[in-house]
Amino acid sequence: MSRYKLVIAAIVLALAQIGFLGWMIAGRAAILRDGKEVLLKVEPVDPRDLLRGDYVRLGYDISRIEVEKIANLPQGEQASVEGPIVVRLKKDTDGYWRATSASLGTDSTVAAADEVDIRGEVTDGWSLTPGSTVRVDYGIERFYVPEGEGLAIEEEMRKRNSGSEPELRSFGIKVAVASDGTGQIKALMDGDTMLFEEPLY
């Protein structure tokens, strides 16, 4: 009888794990399929750390938010504490979306039709004095590429970031943003050319 119970427990546990993984995959696919699409300009991270294995580390201009754009800064505080932040984006004339305002915590006013709110996390220790910026992580700082493709992308990003190829448009990342502000990478863009697209499943 005890062996029968162990088998049943193992089956229930396996089904629960499969259900959880399926729920995660379906949630990601729903964001990619139904989320509002924004294009973010890529800013390479420290070139020594840009490529690790088969993924490229990415930074964005919205990775650093000016203190003056944060509507609800805690009074009298000199440094940030770890926690969520909602950053409001609006499409600029060059096609890239940029931060227009931000709010610490998870509550924010309703975004207009031409705006998108994306959620991120602020780490502690960033100065809150005027003229400073805080670092925000959105969970979209890695992009996995096919084996052997990363070095060429890394080198091209460095060239464009240094200004040695000013005639070429910057690399960009298409991001799908869900109604709750969660972002998922959809594609890596080289100007108007899609280099790699994330599959739904």
Image (cartoon, grey):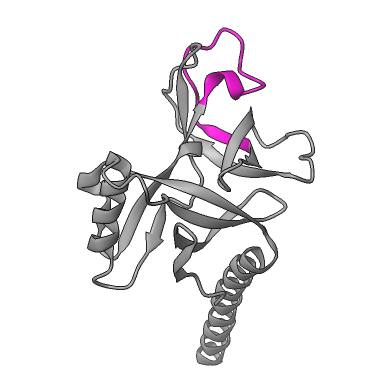
Q: Quadrant of the N terminus?
A: bottom right
Taking the view exactly as shown, the residue that stands out farthest to the top is 76
* Count of number-bearing discs: 0
Residue 77 appears at what percent x and percent y? 53, 12
Q: Is 23 on the left or on the right of 78, as rendered? A: right
| 181 over 193 or under it: above or below | above
Residue 165 appears at what percent x and percent y? 30, 47
Q: Is 71 on the left or on the right of 127, as rendered? A: right
Q: Is residue 104 visible?
A: no
Span shown in magenta: 66-87
- Give the quadrant of residue 27: bottom right
Q: Is residue 144 visible?
A: yes
Residue 201 appears at what percent x and percent y? 54, 77
| 177 over 94 or under it: above or below | below
- Residue 186 highlighted magenta (yes or no): no
In front: 134, or 4? Answer: 134
In front: 43, or 128? Answer: 43
Q: Residue at x 41, y 23 (%)?
A: 125
Residue 117 appears at what percent x and percent y? 67, 43
- Residue 86 highlighted magenta (yes or no): yes
In front: 92, or 71? Answer: 92
Taking the view exactly as shown, the residue that stands out farthest to the left is 48
- Give the quadrant of residue 31: bottom right
Q: Residue at x 47, y 14 (%)?
A: 131
Taking the view exactly as shown, the residue that stands out farthest to the front is 167
Q: Residue at x 41, y 49 (%)?
A: 170
Q: Residue at x 39, y 55 (%)?
A: 142
